[in-house]
Image (spheres, grey):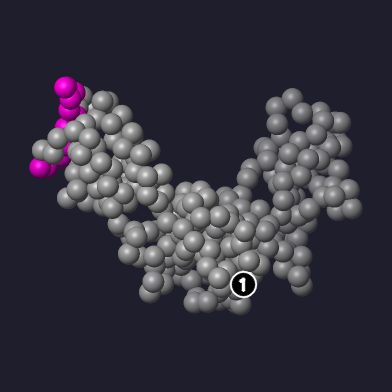
Amino acid sequence: MVKLGHVNTLAALRETQSGFYLDGEELGEILLPGRLIPRGMKAGDTVEVFLYRDSEDRPVATTERPLACVGEFACMRVKDIHERAGAFLDWGLPKDLLLPFREQDPPVRVGQKVVVRVMLDQHTDRIIASALVSRHLSRERPQYRAGLEVDLLVYEETSLGYNAIVEGTHRGLIYRSTVGAPLEIGARLRGFIKEVREDGKIDLSLDRSGYERVAPLARLILEELERLGGRLNLDDSSDPAEIRRRFGASKKAFKQAIGALYRERRIAMLNPGIELVRDRT
């Protein structure tokens, strides 16, 4: 079944001056504009295309990919605001994506990055965006286990920390106290399930807990020391943002890792920085 707002594999029917017409089944013939036709394509071939509607509401195909398909979440930049229709978002295609006023709370502004869900408008069958993220997240109890590594999309800052979309379906919370540096709205991260509470709410962490977190990070630090000739200009007083940039870990986890390496006499503290201890006899 051919679906608007999704990637479909369609058969090429015939070529014209405007491009190739594809078999859109119940949607009829759908144009793939000439500039997007894959080299050497001929009638009878199949091609993967994303389907959306043009400015005249006709189905049109493209080999380009948007930031998100219908049913998915993504962070997009607000390009323009129409006084009656709503905001227009850059979603990676020539035609911008409409974020209606009714799907905004609070209102967005030009240049802002906003996390939205792409969906089909029930009234017009047009592809639109919704910034009412919580409305579109699953209310079913999540079946995640503690320690599971998951994909996260940060979409909102709260008094407690940052709300994130977990695996594109559930909401989870990253507590501010566990984050060394501010997180950016729209950031895609790998994180870990810290706990699924009795009420179904998910607590998240950006680092593994206990030894599972420290041991791999300690190995990364040793590898980096070897690569740099034995010295690293980071230690337990370094900037948290720089630590996360270099190792993808919080300052707390970094301190635990270098503390373990120091106790094992594998590094020496230089204050500032650390040094690899090559002879431990």
Residue at the spot x=10%, y=42% of the render? Answer: 271
Name the residue that disc number 1 marks.
Answer: 135
- Counting other residues with Cα less than 10 Å from the Cα at mark 1, is it few (<14), some (14-19), or many (20 or more)? few
Locate residue 72 relative to residue 32 in the image: left or right: left
Look at the picture and state if 34 lies above or below 140.
Answer: above
Over which residues does the magenta segment extend? 271-281
Q: Nearer the viewer, residue 82 or 118?
A: 118
Disc 1 on helix, strand or loop?
helix
x and y, in percent, of residue 76 in the image: 52, 58
Locate residue 25, reporting x and y percent: 89, 48
Q: Nearer the viewer, residue 16 or 143?
A: 143
Residue 254, x across and y down, in percent: 28, 46
Q: Let me know if residue 75 appears in the view.
A: no
- Magenta segment: does it hold 67? no
Q: Quadrant of the C terminus?
A: top left
Q: Is residue 185 above or below residue 236?
A: below
Residue shown at 67% from the left, 37% from the top: 35
Name the chief secondary structure element in magenta: loop
Compare residues 142 and 95 and report the one nearer the observer: 142
Q: Could you tell me the amino acid type at mark 1?
A: Arg
Residue 260 visible in the snapshot: yes
| Quarter of the image where one finds residue 84 | bottom right
Q: Tell me what residue is drawn at x 72 percent, y 68 percent.
A: 121
Viewer-proximal residue among 31 and 209: 209
26 sits to left or right of 68: right
